Image (cartoon, rainbow, N blue to C red):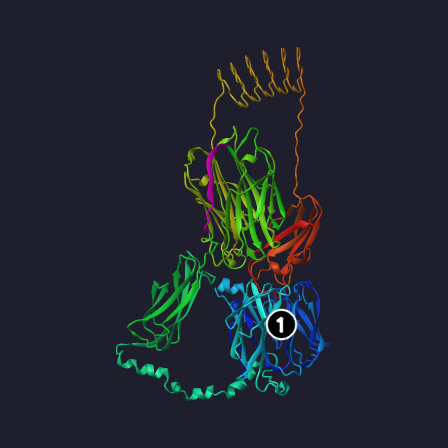
Amino acid sequence: MVLSSGVCSADNYVGGIPLTSAHSGTVSGGVYCDSYYGMGDQEAKASNTIEKTFTVPDNANVEWAMLLTNVYCGHMQNNYQGKAKVDFNGKNLGTETLNVPYTYSYNGGNGHVQVNDHVNRVTSDYMMYYDVTGLVKAGKNTAVVKTDPLDSSFDGRIRLVTLVVAYNDGSKKTIWYQVNRGHDADSYYSDDEMNENYIGSTAFQAALPEGSSLTDSKLTLVYQASSDGAYAFNGNALSSGTPQGTFSGSNTWDVKDSLKSSGTNTLTYDRTASFYKSVLGILTAEYTTSSSGDSTDDTPADNTTDNGSAGDTTDDISSDNTTNDTSSDNTTSDVPAGNTTNDTPADNTTDAKFSADLGVQAIKVSHNSAAKAWKNLVNTVNVTVINNGPEKAGSFALELYSEGSLLESKPINGLANGATEAVEFVWKPEDAKNYTLRAVVVPGSTINDANATNNELSKTQEVMHNGYIGDKPLETYLHGTVKGNIIYDYGNSSYVKVSSGDVYTAGHSLSLPEGAIVKYARLYNFWTWSATGSSGVIPSMSLDFAGSSLTPEAEYADQKGWGQYDYPTGTWAYNVTGLVSGSGNYITTVKNTNSDAENSFCIDGIALLVVYEDASGKETQYWINEGCDAVSTMSSSGGLTPDEATVKIAFAGDSIDLGNVDNARLWTTVQSGGHEGIALKFNEMSISGVYDSTPSSNLDIDEARDVTSYLLSQNNEAQIIAPSVTDNSGDYMIPSSAILAVSYKSETTDDTNITDDTNVTDDTNVTDGTNVTDDTNVTDGTNVTNDTNVTNDTNVTNDTNVTNDTNVTDDTNVTDGTNVTDGTNVTIDTNVTIDTNVTDNTNVTDDTNMKDDTNVTLKVNIIPVISLTVSPDSLDFGTVSPGTPSESLPLALKNNGGISIKVTAEVHDQENGPFATGLLLDQNIWSNYSKVLAAESAETSQAQLDLPLNYSSTGQFQGTLSLWAEAA
């Protein structure tokens, strides 16, 4: 029997160990495999012990056995230190110290770390495997795996404990088997960062005797993932199942109809979620021959040694193989290609000056730092050419084609023998699809290149749309003019995760001037991170405002459109003009109506916009722009620059009378702001630091910014620009609303000697207005003083603080005349209502029908059921050295709601960031944080950054701490 291992590459971003043969042979009984699939039943960052009993068939005579276990350390690269003790049937197999860091292959790592001859690390897992052939017995066998942390960060949960036993049982069956072991990772990083869809594979070399009859064949794969993979065996798709554990599982398939009785049988596996690992593959084939009656026990075929020493066996087999002898007799080696090539051109290229074999070695596509190609953006195509000699090359050209059309031709001169040169092209594809790129070397007249087979190379390149570019400008919903003003209020809204069936509540308390009339009212629901499980979905929600059920008048949404965490975010706008009547409290409730228990979305906040008319206000021209444009420059953005992640906001339309402008104000709303590097531009104004987490980093509002000095007569434009990735790691943000309000100067008048000024309204603070005659229906004339000889002033209402008003005659129906003093000889004062504080009112006669109509004003402040506020909105730990904790920073928590709540924490960090690793809340790692707050109470927690001594990342980092509140 020939035994060899399949050759395949691992995930080129994170690394891994492809599955290769650990053992193979022929037995009469079969191959037993059973596992403990764990993690959910264990405690993180604590000592854990798992005891697993394996029941081997009673009549088993063990030929070979292996115990395998995997332990989770808690981080894909950091060196969180712990130890694992492994016992089997009372014997200690090893006490392993798990204390090595891991580096991704993409960052220069080796693809795995070999701790010793039976322990390795790939990303966050340590794999340990032991030969237990001499310890396994028929019946019950017990394995005990115990882990202990050596630092506060080591997770220590046990993902998997598996026993594999190949055994004979005295029957006359003949079963060939091969056990492949590895630690092969498949991550979304290779897709997102390198544009490579890694599909793992493992090969089984079957060698059933010629003429044998196959009676049965089974294939088993043991994997580590939260979601089962996608599989094929010899090109035939296999069904997938559900993991038996939190992060591990196995499948067994009947592959009799697909098995090749001799040669290579290939199993391929591919991830269906973010991360996937395969660790163990077992293929068995039961067959019969004409001599099947002979006992198979007499001829055990043990072709490999333990610990995967397939290489040794291959060497032995290869030494007897005639391939090497055949090669030595091959006439090709007697007639080297180089000699033939050198003889040929001498007669035909007498003018040639150089003899060089030019080739295209590689085509790599990128967008800045990311191995991606984006639609409608300028991407880089890097083509590497090589001169295989034997001489230096003269002048030649390198051409690049896309879909058969020439993009550009570039000259190259003097490439030395054996040298390579990288040539850079720019490429801006217009469609999202797969393109064929072809690079072609065109030798010049001075070069003799007899080998043209390597002069060109093609590559299929996927081009996608990147939803993180600024491609959805905020549109003008409403533009107009009002004599009045604008209110933009976010109330007590806050960032809350809303799971299936949950209800979110926010309140707004409006205060409008007396007599103001609401012209327009609009409610904004800012939502984000909408998903069912790990799949992004548009949310299902109902919204009630002021007791009325509403549907959105406009729905705006955006999402990344590729890679991991592809969740939509949005702005939904509701017309509430008929529901906002004036000052008062307005309540909004939002309910998640999706019935799937795994569904949730987050509310960043609720904002209420009111445009109102006010007789005492100024003429105001306004633009209301709204939308949703998610942009990012973080390392996960696909290499986007600030210019590409800019959101534009145009305020077009009517001209502005700059000479009469009193002031111009700009409101902008950015979901997920909170980064000082975000720039705000308005025409020639350009400033940063305005998005400072006010009122919160999740709903960052720059309110009523004075832009008067930068105003243009028309076509004003604002821009919100994400910071560079070099500026505190860039930022992800969603500009969602912008309001421009331009107020004009008021006209001025002189009210002296106004005669017969009928229906003058709101004549406030008119002083010494002598000889105002026949001023009928003067309303609300407050603080009129020394107003002598006002005659026939009928129906003066609300005339407050009239002082020394001598000889007021025939003043019928004076209502609410508060603080009238020294009002001598006031006669026939009929129907005076609520005449409060009348002093020295001598000779008031015939004061008929005086009433005291007291009004009771009703007010209430309704608080939400669950409402948590946290202060401050930003924590700066300063400069921190691994091994030395930062200073503790206070974090004030206030329960504004009507019930007790439990507060938990979640950290969003960039890749290799420090916060997921070392953020402590009340001296415990953030993932263990839990605090109960009574209704309308406050408490303070302490935040601290404590990085392990072996933490390797350096530089500036930014993350987000989310605090979740739920009913206690």
The stretch drawn in magenta includes residue 247: no
Quickly name the residue at label 1: 127
* 173 up-or-down from 549: above or below: below
* 276 up-or-down from 745: above or below: below
Relative to residue 66, is residue 108 drawn left or right? left
Q: Is the magenta stretch mostly helix, strand or loop?
A: strand
Q: In which quarter of the image is residue 695?
A: top right
What is the secondary structure assignment of the residue under circle 1?
A: strand
Residue closer to the observer: 745 or 519: 519
Q: Residue furthest right?
A: 90
Q: Residues within 10 Å of mark 1 (few under 14, many from 20)?
A: many
Q: Give the range drawn in magenta.
A: 470-483
Residue 204 spot, x, y in % from top left: 54, 77
Residue 494 spot, x, y in % from top left: 60, 46
Residue 887 visible to an observer of this rendering = no
Q: In which quarter of the image is the N terminus?
A: bottom right
Residue closer to the observer: 437 or 575: 575
For image coordinates 65% across by 43% down, the residue present is 864
Residue type pointed to by label 1:
Met
The stretch drawn in magenta includes residue 482: yes
Residue 641 spot, x, y in % from top left: 46, 55
Residue 798 spot, x, y in % from top left: 59, 21
Residue closer to the observer: 546 or 238: 238
For image coordinates 68% across by 67% down, the residue present is 150
Relative to residue 713, is residue 17 drawn left or right? right
